[in-house]
Amino acid sequence: MQIDLNSDLGEGYGAWRMGDDAAMLQIVSSANIACGFHAGDPRGLLETLRQAAQQGVAVGAHVSYPDRVGFGRRHMEVAPDDLTADVIYQIGALQGLARAAGTRVTYVKPHGALYNTIAHDAGQAEAVIAGVLAVDPTLVLMGLAGAPILDRARAAGLSVAAETFADRAYAPDGTLVPRGQPGAVLHDVDLVADRMVQLASTGIIQAADGSSLQLQADSICVHGDSLGAVQMAARIRQALSDRGVSIAPFAP
C-alpha cells in the first residue's frame, strides 16, 4: 500500500519566514511550492526548490489568486481568460526556478480560495485546466478528493491526484469546514495520525458531525504554516509506516 504525503512550502516573503521548509522536506514526498501570487519571493523559492531537489521530493506549482495580503484565502471573481493567464504565468515562473535548482515541476495544486472554488465552480475550473494544458498537458492536477474538478480535468485529458487534508475537518458532503468555523483546523497530532491511518487503510474519514465519508485519496496534505506542522507530518508518516503504508510521490 502506498500514498503520497505533501505540504505547502515556499510561503515566506523576504524577512518574514513561514513554516520550516527544510525540516518538512525531510518528511514529505511532494512539495507544493508557492508561485509568488499568494506568497513566496524568488530567492526563497529557489532555496526551497534546491532543498527539495536534494531530498528527492517531487515539486508542484501551488498556483493562487493574486492575493498576497489575504494569503490567497479570499475568493475572487476573475475573468476566465485572466485566470488562465495567471495560471500559465505562475507555472512558468516556477518551472524556470525549478530548472535552475536542478529539479522540475511535475504537478499543479491550486491554493486556498482558488482550490476550494474550482472544486465545484465549472467556470473557474475550466480556466485553470486550460492554463495547465497550455503549459504542459503531462502535468498532474491535484484537487479535492470526490470533487467535480477531478472529473472535469480527466475529461480534458489531464491526469489527476485526489487529495485529502490531515489537519482540516470535513463537512458531511466532503467539502472542508470553512476556516472561520470552530474546529475547522485540527491540532491533536495523535488524532490526526489515527484519522490518516484509517483513511489509507479503509478509504473512510470521519466528518465533523460524526458521519463517515468514503474518499479515494492519492495524497495527504499537512499545511506547512499550521502550528506544529513538522511534528504532525512526522507523526503521520511514522503511523502510516507502522501500518505498512509506504510514502512516495504520486508524480515523481
Image (cartoon, rainbow, N blue to C red):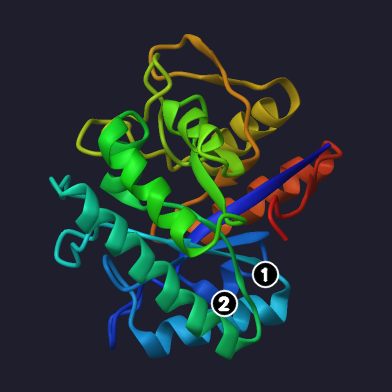
Estimate the spatial distance between the alpha carbons at disc 2 and disc 1, rounded to whole Å.
7 Å
Q: Secondary structure at mark 1?
A: loop
Q: Tell me where residue 204 appears, x and y as whole percent.
A: 62, 19
Picture quarter with the N terminus:
top right
Q: Secondary structure at mark 2?
A: helix
Taking depth in this image into account, of 20 and 190 the one nearest to the observer is 20
Q: Residue at x 43, y 68 (%)?
A: 91
Is 112 placed left or right of 212 in the picture? left
Is 96 placed left or right of 194 in the picture? left
- Residue 234 is tagged as none
- Which residue is label 2 attached to? 22
Q: Is residue 228 above or below residue 20?
A: above
Q: Residue at x 42, y 37 (%)?
A: 168
Q: Residues within 10 Å of mark 2 (few under 14, many from 20)?
A: some
Q: Residues within 10 Å of mark 1 (few under 14, many from 20)?
A: some
Is 247 placed left or right of 105 in the picture? right
- Residue 26 is tagged as 1
Q: Tell me where residue 191 appears, x and y as whole percent.
A: 56, 33
Whether residues under marks 2 and 1 lie with C-beta atoms below 8 angstroms apart, the answer is yes
Q: Tell me where residue 22 appears, x and y as whole percent.
A: 57, 77
Amino acid type at image mark 2: Ala
Q: Residue at x 70, y 82 (%)?
A: 54
Is residue 165 visible in the rendered image? The answer is no
Taking depth in this image into account, of 75 and 118 the one nearest to the observer is 118
Q: Residue at x 43, y 33 (%)?
A: 149
Q: Is residue 245 above or below residue 84?
A: above
| Residue 197: quadrant of the picture | top right
Q: Tell me where residue 2 appears, x and y as whole percent.
A: 79, 42
Residue furthest to the top in view is 211
Amino acid type at image mark 1: Gln
Is residue 71 visible in the rendered image? The answer is yes
Picture quarter with the C terminus:
bottom right
